[in-house]
Every structure is written in structure tokens, then in C-alpha cells.
Image (cartoon, rainbow, N blue to C red):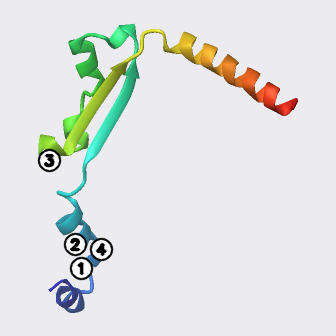
């Protein structure tokens, strides 16, 4: 049917028709954010996702928004990076 329509109307955009017909309701959206103390309350977390409904329209089952609370992420990451650097240096000297 789409080919027939495209043959009859040179302005008909076959790619857009396929995208709108097949993909519009298939797409799913996911946002995951690492948060610290400033966003570790329900209201503050909700603010992080303000406008998500408009940016990813459709049924709510198509959207997922997650947060993970890591209060001392920077300190942990710095310690982990220091260990990795030591390991790399040890391997390089072998």
C-alpha cells in the first residue's frame, strides 16, 4: 500500500510513513542518573525528570527513569582510580 501511495504521489515521504507507522509506539526511553545528597529526596528526584513526559510522549510503560544514590561517589572513585594506577604501574614494571 505504501509503495502504491508513493508511486501515485511524488511528495509522499515513504521513510516518514514507515517510521510513523512502525516505530512511533515501539520506541522506549530510559534515563538513569547517579545522584548525591542534594537530590536524595522524592521531590528533588522528580525535578530531575521534569519534562520527560513531553520529551518521550506516549504511554508511561514506554518510559523509565531511575536514580541511584551514591553519597560519596567522588571519594570512592578517587580511591578506586588510585588502586588502578598502582596496578597498571606494577604490571608495566614486570
Image position of 71 (left or right of 49): right
Say if mark 2 contacts mark 1, CB within 8 Å.
Answer: yes
Depicted 9 relative to depicted 78: above or below: below
* Mark 2 → mark 1, Cα distance in angstroms: 8 Å
Q: Residue 12 carries which label?
A: 1
Q: Name the residue under label 4.
A: 15
Q: Residue 58 carries which label?
A: 3
Is residue 13 visible in the rendered image? The answer is no
Gap between marks 2 and 3, in whole Å? 18 Å
Task: Residue at 19% x, 45% y: name it.
Answer: 62
Asked if disc 2 and disc 3 are in contact, CB closer than 8 Å, the reply is no
Looking at the rendered image, the quarter that the N terminus falls into is bottom left
**Earlier-in-chain disc, 3 versus 4:** 4
Question: Where, by quadrant of the figure, is residue 35 drawn?
Answer: top left
Badge 4: how crowded within 10 Å, few (<14), some, or many (20+)?
few
Residue 20 on image: x %, y %: 21, 65
Report helix, strand or loop for mark 3. Answer: loop
Gap in Å between the C-alphas at discs 1 and 4?
9 Å
The alpha-carbon separation of the residues under discs 1 and 3 comes to 25 Å
Which class describes the residues within 10 Å of circle 2: few (<14), some (14-19), or many (20+)?
A: few
Residue beneath disc 2: 17
Residues at marks 1 and 3 touching, judged by CB atoms closer than 8 Å = no
Q: Residue furthest left?
A: 59
Which is nearer the N-term, disc 1 or disc 3?
A: 1
Mark 3, other Cα within 10 Å: few <14 / some 14–19 / many ≥20 = some
Residue 73: image tag: none
Identify which residue is drawn at 33% across, 13% down.
39
Tell me the element at label 2. helix
Q: Which of 21 and 66 is in front in this view?
A: 66
Q: What element carries label 4?
A: helix
Amino acid at each position: 500500500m505504501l509503495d502504491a501511495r508513493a508511486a501515485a504521489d511524488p511528495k509522499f515521504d515513504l521513510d516518514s510513513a514507515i517510521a510513523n507507522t512502525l516505530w512511533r509506539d515501539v520506541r522506549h526511553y530510559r534515563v538513569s542518573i547517579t545522584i548525591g545528597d542534594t537530590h536524595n529526596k522524592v521531590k528533588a528526584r522528580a525535578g530531575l525528570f521534569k519534562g520527560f513526559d513531553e520529551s518521550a510522549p506516549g504511554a508511561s510503560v514506554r518510559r523509565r527513569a531511575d536514580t541511584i544514590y551514591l553519597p560519596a561517589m567522588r571519594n570512592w572513585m578517587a580511591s578506586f582510580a588510585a588502586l588502578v594506577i598502582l596496578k597498571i604501574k606494577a604490571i608495566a614494571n614486570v
